[in-house]
Amino acid sequence: MDTLQFLTWVRGTGLNIALVIFVLGVLWRLAEIYGLGRKKDLSAPRNMPGASGWATILRRSLPPPGMLPTSPVSYIAGYVFHVGLAVVAFLFAPHIALLTSIVAAAWPGLPSQVVDFVTVVTMAAMIAVLIDRIARPVKRFLSTFGDWFTWTLTFLPLLTGWLAVHHLLLPYTLMLAVHILSVELLLVFLPFTKLFHAFTAFGSRWFNGAMNGHKGVPV
Amino acid sequence: MSASLDKGVRVLKEMIDAPIASYFSSCVHCGICAEACLFYTETGDPKYTPIHKLEPMRRIYEQEYTLLGRLAKRVGLSKAVTDAELAEWQELVYNSCTLCARCSAVCPVGNDIVYMVRKMREGMSAAGHSPEGIKGAVTRTINIGSPMGVKLPAVKAQMKHAEADYGIPIPLDQEGVEYLVTLSSMEIINFPEYLGAIAKIMRHVGKTWTLSSEAFEATNAGMQIGNSDLARVIVSRVVAGAEKLKVKTVISPECGHAYTALRWEGANLIGRPFTFKVQHIVEVLEEFRAAGLLKLEGMATDRLTFHDPCQLARRGGVIQPQRNLMKMVAKDFVEMPDAGFMNWCCGGGGGASSIEEGEELRLEAFKRKKRQLEAVKPDRLVTACANCRIVLEEGLEHYKMNLPVVGLTETIAEHIPDA
């Protein structure tokens, strides 16, 4: 397999395999989790404005009062890399072109210099959370293979994409193929690792908000 | 696998529902829950990170309810939960967790961690890994009627004292009255002024009420240890008493977990909605205040602050009423940092105060409360939970802080004009 064949494979068969595993994996995991159901709460509810599942989905996007100084890196770098990932993945013109071919919808992108800057900032933020994970006793204590593995899975598409755009390290075609492959690996593993919080965080916030909302507590 | 471990694992498996599956699937190991937990912040030991306290349950979730986990288990790639492991986790699930739920209030992905700890305790107690102190409290509640071994004659003796002190008759087993007043044994033994205060307040506002000879004890050690079968037996006594006397409302005493047991878990434990209303005494007092029934006289001039019991505020949704009441009687009412929804636990909730071997850790965790108090330097500390009160008193004594702790109900009653 030469470079061009490799690129063709990752763009075609490889992408299809990854997308199928991703979609089926997500559906399976969602069914596996939410299919477990829960018991109806028989206690008399108390109503309070702002105490609901939907309110908590929004509220938990911000640090609760007093929490920011306790974990500044987690909050600030966490914010930066989440927003950065979304910008790079969905607002880079070549990505939009690819996504358009899959979902049949188009939207305007950002200038490539802006995306380039965001990519660098996102990588810096990811390195910051990695250092924080190593340096902070609690995070280091909680860390498992999955944490290092998923960090790598998330970082590689950023790094390889940035290297490809700048024609660094490997010939462009090969680097582009490696970049696409890294995204495919991310898609394949996302449903089966902690990266699945991209989906379940909303369900978790909703449950917490709804169950405490039943008691009239806006959590 | 021993019989008790087998049972514990089975119960843990049964406990896992969609919220728990969602919570375990969402955790990104950010460690922010640790920063909310006084057992971590005051010791700096990462093992007290709230989500870590659930590790055995998480593994059972993974091994039993996820495709990859089931495969890994089949080919022998996953580690089964052992008896030794559960024994090790006992300290984490009981001694160092007061079910205060600050972790549940801060988790960025929204995990209600304390909901899971409550469920994990079901498996721990089934496996025989629960503290002797709480076990004793449960046994006494089931066999004698109260966690501190209080029987009806002790209640009657306190009724007599209160009648003599206040000159107000204390009704017992009166049918058709509006309120059934319940007590915690801590109030019967250590804080009998609560009963007199209730009598004074009820006469002042002109409401009918009664104690019940069957349902005087509101606390529920069965819930604290995590045994729903026993918790049901205990809560059923109050339900039976309330229904027999046909009261409109059962008043939970100044006790945080009794409120949770009656107000939120009770109906779920017995499997049907209650036919009566449950209110914490603070909610009842707030209704009296809002209706203009509390005509108090005089204001305290010393500096007062209020300690929010976790189960009343963060876990119960009663946050503003106690403040409205405090402002009726206190000229100089100050709020501690983080007061209200994010208040720090006294360190002894959720059954922790009855764990003898947890005392050293509890006093260490009390440093948080100490700092909160030092920030506002009150002359008196008011609360609305007899258990908080006793834990606060112990902590204050240990750190040689001279600060009286009083109940909100008796504080209100002191300002009721003599009839």
Image: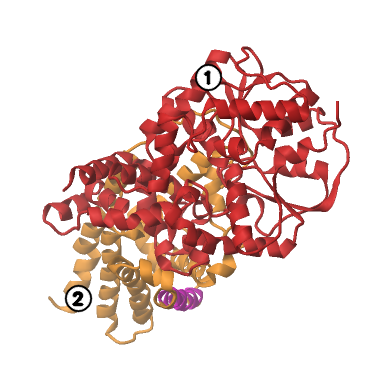
Count of all numbered marks drawn on residues in the image: 2
As drawn, the label of residue B144 is none
Report how far apart the C-alphas of labels 2 and 1 lie in the structure. Answer: 81 Å
Prevailing secondary structure class for the magenta stretch in the rendered image: helix
* Mark 1 burial class by Cα count in 10 Å: few <14, some 14-19, many 20+: many
* Stretch in magenta: A114-130
Question: Chain under label 2?
Answer: A
Picture coordinates of residue A33, whole percent (x, y): 32, 44
Q: Left or right: where does residue B51 sit relative to residue B384?
A: left
Vertical comparison of A1 with B356: above or below: below
Q: Left or right: where does residue B10 sit relative to residue B183?
A: left
* Front in this rendered view, residue A74 or B106: B106
Specify how the rendered protein is coloured.
Answer: by chain
Residue located at (74% from left, 61% from top): B376
Q: Is residue B306 visible?
A: yes
- Give the amino acid type for the residue marked by disc 1 in the picture: Gly
* Front in this rendered view, residue A120 or B370: B370
Q: Left or right: where does residue B233 sit relative to residue A182?
A: right
Question: Chain under label 1?
Answer: B
The hue used for chain B is red
- Give the amino acid type for the residue marked by disc 2 in the picture: Leu
Picture coordinates of residue B327, whole percent (x, y): 80, 44
As drawn, the label of residue B241 is 1
Vertical comparison of A166 with B30: above or below: below
* Front in this rendered view, residue A163 or A70: A70
Residue with the mark numbered 2? A4
Extreme-bottom residue of the structure:
A169
Q: Closer to us: mark 2 or mark 1?
A: 1
**Element type where label 2 sits in the image:** helix
